[in-house]
Image (cartoon, coloured by chain):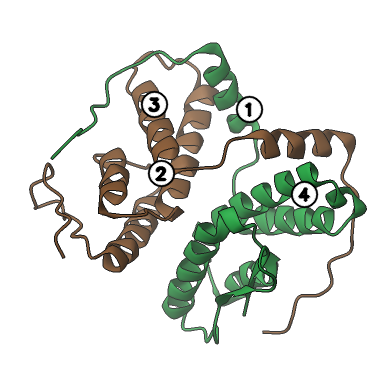
Chain colours: A brown, B green
Amino acid sequence: MTANTDITPKVPTPEEIMHYTMMADLPAETVEGLAEALLAARCHAKLAIWQSASARLGLARYIANTALRLAAIKASDGEAFILKLNAFRGIQFNDGGHTGGTIKCLLRAEARRLGVHVPEPEDNPQAPSTKP
Amino acid sequence: MPNIPSVTPILPGSEELERYRLLAQQPRASIEHLAGLLMTLRAHAASIAAFDPVVHRGIFREVAHVALCLAILRSADPDQFRRKAAALEGVQFLDEALDAARAIQLLMTIEAKRLGINLETMTVHDASPTNPTLNS
C-alpha cells in the first residue's frame, strides 16, 4: 500500500472547534468509566417506555459505541478485565452478530495477553477465572 | 466472583435523553461516510487550528473514535476494505488512544485475512514519543 500523504490542511469551522474543545474537556477514558457508562445505558434500554424510535436508535448507537470503546481499551490486569467482561454480560446487538463478534474477538485477544479464561456461553457465567 | 452487575430498568435523565436524541440524528455509519469524516478530521489536524493544544487533543480524541468505528465496519469487498485502509493509513494517535490503535490494527488484520488481502504489516508505529501512527 502506498503512503497516504495527500492530507490537505483545512481549518475547522468555529462550530467544529467548539466540538473539539468539548471533546478535549472530557475525562480520559478508563475501563471503570466505560463499564459504568455501558451498564447505565443498558439499564436505560431495559425500560419498556421508549416511545420514541429516535431515542431508541440513539440509545442503541450509544451502547454499541461505548461497548466497542470498552472492548478496545486495555485492561491493566485480570481484575480490570473481569470488570469489562461483567459489563458485557448478556449484552445483545441487533446487527446480525457483527458488533458482538468483533467485541468477542477483541476480548479473546486481550484474554490471551492477560492469560485469563473467557467463559463461553456453556460455561458458568458467574465464574470467569483469572487463572491462566 | 465479586460484583456481578445487574441490569435493572432506570429512567434516563434529560441530559442522557438529549445525548441519545443527538446520536440518533447522526447519519448511519458506513465505510464511505466514516472514511470521509476521518479524512476531514485529519485535514483539521494538519491545520493551524491544531496548534492550540486543547483543539489538538479534541481533534485526536475524535480521530481515535472515528477510526475505531471505521475499523469495526465490515467491508463488502476488497475495494471497500482498501478504502478503509487508505483512510486509516498514517493516522496519528495520542498516547491515551494507543489501545484503540492496537485494536484497529487487530481488526484490520483479521478482516484482511477474511478477504484474502495481503495487508503486509499494519502495525502501530511510534513516529514520536507522543504520536504513534498506524501505517501499512
* Three-letter code, disc 1: Leu
Q: Image quadrant of residue A98? A: bottom left
Foreground pick, B47 / A56? B47
Which element carries disc 4, helix, strand or loop?
helix
Q: Is residue A15 left or right of residue A1?
A: right
Image coordinates for residue A65, horizontal then vertical, percent? 49, 43
Q: Considering only vertical position in the picture, is B59 above or below B26?
A: below
> Which chain does tag 2 point to?
A
* Three-letter code, disc 4: His
Quarter containing the N terminus of chain B? top left
Residue carrying label 3:
A40
Q: Residue at left 50%, top 37%?
A: A61
Residue mark closest to the camera, 3 vs 2: 2
Foreground pick, B10 / A27? A27
Residue B22: assigned label: 1
Residue A31: assigned label: 2
Q: Residue at left 34%, top 24%?
A: A43
Q: CA distance from mark 2 to mark 4?
A: 24 Å
The reply to whether residue A26 is in sight is: yes
Residue carrying label 4:
B56
Residue A16: assigned label: none
* Three-letter code, disc 2: Val
> Which chain does tag 4 point to?
B
